[in-house]
Amino acid sequence: MTVLKYATFDADIGRFLVVRGDRGLRAVRFSKNLDVERELSQLTRDGRVFAVEDRITLRRVVDDIRDYLRGRQPRFDHELELESLSEFSHRVLDIVAGIPYGSLRSYKWVAAQAGSPRATRPVGQILSRNPLPIIIPCHRVVNSDGTLGGYSGGGTDMKRRLIEIENGQIGLAFQRGGDEAKKQVLFQIEGDATDGDDGD
């Protein structure tokens, strides 16, 4: 029998669910209208898995996420439980976990770092299923043309909000156009431009 420990909390950007397995963090879910019961039932649909609330065990994770949402820079050095993922998915998530706070990289850059420069769409698909958004900061990965791309943690509005938290500003423009739009993109996006969208 597998026991998952979980904690919930509310923040300005929505309701959070944090879940830990025996060997580390297994899931972070959040949205304005998060259905905690539904999320837990998905995580425990195997009859040999059940979830128990444990705010003490998950206190540091919760505190780190709260600090992050306040614009601070926690270390997020928690053990992760990602054994069910493919080798390529592990590689992509490891690369994304290393993107510095306040920086953006392109899907193409991530694919190249993972050793598969043409795999921008598979990279986007992996990040769209990221089980630990914020902890593994897939919001820092955008399209090469400066547009946001998709986001597993609640869509592009949430992705924009997290980037704004790291930048300390609101109302950032991300699509490159004229010189004025370029000035509003306050992050360096690493990676070569492509002819079209390259993410999820």
Image: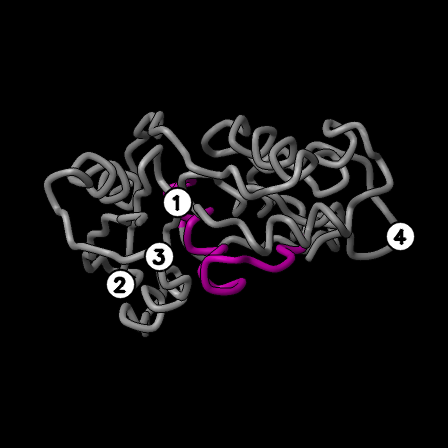
Residue type at mark 2 is Arg
Q: Which residue is disc 3 drawn over?
A: 48
Q: Nearer the viewer, residue 157 or 53?
A: 53
Instruction: Give x and y (percent) for residue 129.
Output: 56, 54
Image check: 129 left or right of 33?
Answer: right
Residues 164 and 191: in front is: 191
Q: Closer to us: mark 3 or mark 1?
A: 3
Q: Tag 2, which secondary structure?
A: strand
Mark 4 vs 3, N-terminal side: 3
Of badges 2 and 1, the one in the foreground is 1
Which stretch appears magenta?
147-169
Q: Which circle marks residue 15 in the picture? A: 2
For this rendering, which residue is in front, 59 or 174?
59
Residue 195, disc: 4
Measured from the top left, where is residue 98 in percent x and y?
Answer: 53, 26
- Secondary structure of the residue carrying tag 3 is loop
Counting other residues with Cα less than 10 Å from the Cα at mark 1, is it few (<14), some (14-19), or many (20 or more)? Answer: many
In three-dimensional space, the C-alpha distance between marks 3 and 1, rounded to whole angstroms, equals 16 Å
Instruction: Please tell me which of labels 3 and 1 falls first in the chain.
Output: 1
Camera-nearest label, 2 or 3: 3
| Mark 4: amino acid | Asp
* Residue located at (51% from left, 53% from top): 172
